[in-house]
């Protein structure tokens, strides 16, 4: 089977979007992959070596200097040793507010001249059986998916996570609502191109079935859940690990956690928080979550390195912001990091609103220490300090739920069956 991936992110194992792709496709033995992606970073994975790249930098240079947009990159071997770099776009527009920043990016991609004929030529040369294109909440990625699908007619399988379609958004910006109106209209059109759409939550599955009449299925990220990584003792100091993005004000939740740990450590280090992220920190964030003792920020690491870090830690964290705006943005989201946390051999701690879909899943299954109010953080940490074996109990609970619902061999089997059934429909 030949699968063409169309994504915003570079396929990098240590970054969330790329890690999801690797988790999905690493056991598609005999399949061949190519990727069209819209990011200036290099890929870093052991699956795909055939790429067509576009980026914000290319778009800006095209507008200013009429330079070419897009390039084909084919590696002799799969790219497993490339170095992550920061996107220049983030630096260029760091002074612009959130909604305007998104509009600036959309305008740049709208005004620049893509080489559509080269994109289609690349896709036709690969000649995929299936197009896998996540559904993003921006115009240019949806436009790209429609462009390729209309020319190739290969069936499209998609994946959606954040709720960018419904009107349950807490925003006052007229810029946001103007863009939201046009994005809703485009998304309705884009969904007509999908043969199958995955989501990670029942809430979003039901929402998309109502809104689009789409063929929806639940897809859970998988893990190994090997019993050799279950722990019998707790470290001193107790080590908490957060790995992932600190955007959408997640850093503010981490600040509350870091403050509580600093208070506990006033007469000696009893707990430490290690944060691994690819996001850039401003001075305010640095002061809040990177004191070098109780709370330490590190660069993102590969999934192999992260799992090794987890194996020597005690608590794996899932956090979200508590302000109204961000609660609405992530209310239907199921962070793929949750399954990494469950597979880590650590106790899982979820600090998020009680209605947030990922946290609600953990709470329903009784496999995480769930904190739904920031005022409870300090109390929960002191309870863990007084009863450290509680962490061992939750480590085992996370493993049990993981083996029941997220075991790699079971999820991969179902995923391959879905792709094969969609491929057969194409051939009829």
Image (cartoon, helix red, strand yellow):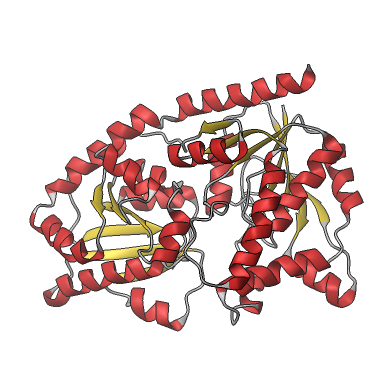
Is residue 196 at least partly visible in the picture?
A: yes
In terms of depth relative to the viewer, which is nearer, 41 or 348? 348
Residue 117 x/y as whole percent? 91, 50
Tell which residue pokes out farthest to the left in this image: 386
Figure check: 193 above or below 138: above
Q: Quadrant of the N terminus?
A: top right
Question: Residue, x 9% and y 52% (percent of image)?
Answer: 387
Q: Is residue 292 toward the left or the right of residue 267 in the image?
A: right
Q: Is residue 339 toward the left or the right of residue 114 in the image?
A: left
Tell which residue pokes out farthest to the top in this image: 428
Figure check: 308 above or below 132: below
Is residue 230 at least partly visible in the picture?
A: no
Question: Residue, x 88% and y 76% (percent of image)?
Answer: 65
Q: Quadrant of the C terminus?
A: top right
In terms of depth relative to the viewer, which is nearer, 15 or 170? 170
Residue 30 x/y as whole percent? 67, 26
Question: Residue, x 69% and y 29% (percent of image)?
Answer: 31
Residue 54 x/y as whole percent? 77, 58
Figure check: 45 above or below 322: above
Residue 349 x/y as whole percent? 28, 52
């Amino acid at each position: 089977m030949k699968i063409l991936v169309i994504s915003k992110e570079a396929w990098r194992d240590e970054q969330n979007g790329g890690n999801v792709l690797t988790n999905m496709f690493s056991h598609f033995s005999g399949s061949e992959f190519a990727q069209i992606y819209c990011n200036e970073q290099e890929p870093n994975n052991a699956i795909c070596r055939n790429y067509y790249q576009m980026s914000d930098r290319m778009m800006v240079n095209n507008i200013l200097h009429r330079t070419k947009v897009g390039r084909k990159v084919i590696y002799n071997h799969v790219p497993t040793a490339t170095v992550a770099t920061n996107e220049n776009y983030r630096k260029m527009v760091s002074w612009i507010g959130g909604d305007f920043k998104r509009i600036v990016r959309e305008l740049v991609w709208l005004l620049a001249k893509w080489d559509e004929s080269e994109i289609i030529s690349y896709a036709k040369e690969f000649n995929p059986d299936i197009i896998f294109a996540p559904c993003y909440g921006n115009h240019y990625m949806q436009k790209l998916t429609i462009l390729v699908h209309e020319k190739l007619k290969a069936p499209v399988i998609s994946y959606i996570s954040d709720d960018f379609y419904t009107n349950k958004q807490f925003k006052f910006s007229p810029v946001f609502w103007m863009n939201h109106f046009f994005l809703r209209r485009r998304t309705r059109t884009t969904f007509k191109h999908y043969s199958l759409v995955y989501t990670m939550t029942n809430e979003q599955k039901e929402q998309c079935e109502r809104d689009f009449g789409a063929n929806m299925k639940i897809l859970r990220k998988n893990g190994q859940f090997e019993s050799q990584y279950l722990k019998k003792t707790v470290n001193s100091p107790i080590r908490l690990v957060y790995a992932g993005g600190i955007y959408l004000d997640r850093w503010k939740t981490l600040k509350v956690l870091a403050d509580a740990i600093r208070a506990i450590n006033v007469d000696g280090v009893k707990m430490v928080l290690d944060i691994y992220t690819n996001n850039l920190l401003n001075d305010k964030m640095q002061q809040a979550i990177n004191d070098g003792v109780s709370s330490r920020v590190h660069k993102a690491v590969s999934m192999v390195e992260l799992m090794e870090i987890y194996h020597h830690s005690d608590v794996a964290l899932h956090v979200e912001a508590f302000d109204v705006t961000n609660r609405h943005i992530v209310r239907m989201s199921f962070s793929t990091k949750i399954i990494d946390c469950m597979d880590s051999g650590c106790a899982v701690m979820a600090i998020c609103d009680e209605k947030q879909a990922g946290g609600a899943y953990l709470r329903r299954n009784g496999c995480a220490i769930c904190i739904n109010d920031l005022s409870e953080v300090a109390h929960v940490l002191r309870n863990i300090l007084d009863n450290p074996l509680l962490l061992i109990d939750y480590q085992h609970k996370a493993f049990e739920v993981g083996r029941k619902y997220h075991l790699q061999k079971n999820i991969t089997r179902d995923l391959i069956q879905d792709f094969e059934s969609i491929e057969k429909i194409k051939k009829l």
